[in-house]
Amino acid sequence: MVYYLLSFSAELENLTDLQPRGGCDDPAYPYYFKLKCENCGEVSQKETCVVISEEVPLPTGRGTANLVQKCKLCGRDGSIQMIAGHGQPLTLEQSQKEEFAKLMIFDSRGFEPTDFSFADGWKAESMAGSTYNVDLSAGEFAEYDEKGACPVGISNLQAKFSVVKKQERRGGKDVFL
């Protein structure tokens, strides 16, 4: 099993706390990305949608996962289980330092997630306290904050998957590095 951390970054203008609308562990937020088969290297043509609130039985009959899929080229089964509790909103300070915020950890067996696509269902807060529901599927967002009398925006969206290791349990929670 390999654990992949999905992190994201963006240029925030007069906004902070960019995250999925229901928070970083939003059970309804759909994650869209492509899958690379770890057996044959085939990358899926279409994006796959994974939602933490949806579970399907594993082919072995032992347990469930958020996604079970066969590679279209070699026919091998693969699965992905989402591990909540490790995400955090992207703050204005992180954006200014060009840092990435953690979004979700995926326990992947047989597949490597690649090419995350931003979609609708995000929110951010202006420096004046206004909340914005944001659709990031176009790759950017721009609006005018009446309360703060200034423009607000999101641009230069970036996402990356990186391998992390499960180190230990602290206070009943897994720690990933």
Image: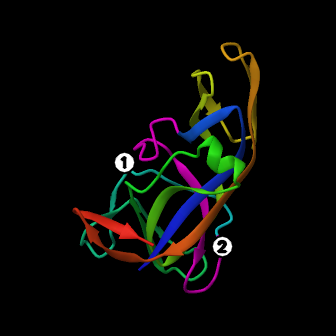
Q: Amino acid at mark 2?
A: Val
The part of the chain drawn in magenta is: 20-43
Label 1's element? loop
Left or right: residue 114 versus residue 87 is right
Check disc 1: other Cα within 10 Å, few if <14, some if 14-19, many if 20+: few
Q: In the image, is 102 to the left or to the right of 137?
A: left
Looking at the picture, tell me which residue is in the foreground, 30 or 141.
141
Residue 127, quarter of the rendered image = top right
Q: Amino acid at mark 1?
A: Ser
Q: Judge whether residue 118 can be spotted in this image.
A: no
Q: Is residue 33 above or below residue 162?
A: above
Reading the image, the residue beneath label 1 is 53
Question: Circle 2 sits on which residue?
Answer: 43
Give the image location of residue 108, x and y in percent.
45, 72
Give SS at disc 2: loop
Is 45 situated above or below 139?
A: below
Which image quadrant for residue 162?
A: bottom right
Image mark for residue 125: none
Q: Nearer the viewer, mark 2 or mark 1?
A: 1
Q: Position of residue 43 (x, y in %)?
A: 66, 73
Magenta highlight on residue 140: no
Task: Estimate the x, y position of residue 73 in percent, counting from the top left.
Answer: 61, 79
Of helix, strand and loop, which mostly describes the magenta segment? loop
Residue toward you, 81 or 126 = 126
Please identify the quadrant where the C terminus is shown: bottom left
Q: Residue at x 50, y 70 (%)?
A: 4
Which residue is located at x 58 percent, y 53 percent?
32
Q: Is residue 65 left or right of residue 154?
A: left
Residue 168 at x, y percent in the picture: 30, 75
